[in-house]
Image (cartoon, helix red, strand yellow):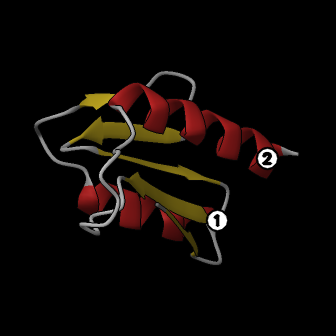
């Protein structure tokens, strides 16, 4: 799943991002203006957008994306925002 939030300003998106990143996890170089992955999700922000990508928790979705697939999709979305 991908959740995309328009926070109106870059500072707004950065502020929300900073509240949700956790100590456990790691940064992802070259994704968004800042990015983090851990706990089965990817968080990043670009311009006024804050994004959260994670596996659909619904039980009917038995196949879950790998962490690498979530990161790959995040790069695709980031590129679309830049364009």
Residue at numbered disc 2: 80
* Rendered location of residue 26, percent (x, y): 26, 28
Q: CA distance from mark 2 to mark 1?
A: 14 Å
Instruction: Report the side of 75 relative to 61 (left or right).
Output: right
Tell me the SS state at disc 2: helix
Asked if residue 29 is positioned above or below residue 79 in the image, the reply reads above
Tags 2 and 1 touching, CB below 8 Å = no
Instruction: Report the side of 47 relative to 65 (left or right).
Output: right
Visible residue check, residue 29: yes
Residue found 79% across the figure and 46% down from its top: 80
Q: Say few, some or many: other residues with alpha carbon within 10 Å of mark 2 (under 14 / 14 to 19 / 20 or more).
A: few
Residue found 38% across the figure and 67% down from its top: 16
Residue found 64% across the figure and 65% down from its top: 48
* Rendered location of residue 52, percent (x, y): 43, 58
Tell me the SS state at disc 1: loop
The disc at residue 62 is none
Q: Say few, some or many: other residues with alpha carbon within 10 Å of mark 1 (under 14 / 14 to 19 / 20 or more).
A: some
Residue occupying the far right of the picture = 83
Residue at numbered disc 1: 48
In the foreground, 55 or 53: 55
Asked if residue 37 is positioned above or below residue 55 in the image, the reply reads above
Instruction: Report the side of 28 relative to 19 (left or right).
Output: right
* Rendered location of residue 62, percent (x, y): 29, 52
Residue found 57% across the figure and 76% down from its top: 7
Would you identify the image quadrant in which residue 56 lies? bottom left
Asked if residue 56 is positioned above or below residue 73 in the image, the reply reads below
């Amino acid at each position: 799943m991908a959740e995309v939030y328009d926070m109106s300003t870059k500072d707004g998106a950065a502020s929300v991002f900073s509240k949700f990143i956790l100590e456990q996890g790691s940064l992802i170089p070259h994704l968004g203006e800042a990015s983090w992955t851990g706990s089965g999700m990817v968080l990043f922000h670009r311009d006024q957008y804050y994004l959260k990508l994670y596996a659909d928790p619904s039980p009917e979705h038995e196949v879950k994306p790998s962490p690498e697939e979530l990161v790959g999709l995040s790069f695709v979305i980031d590129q679309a925002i830049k364009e």
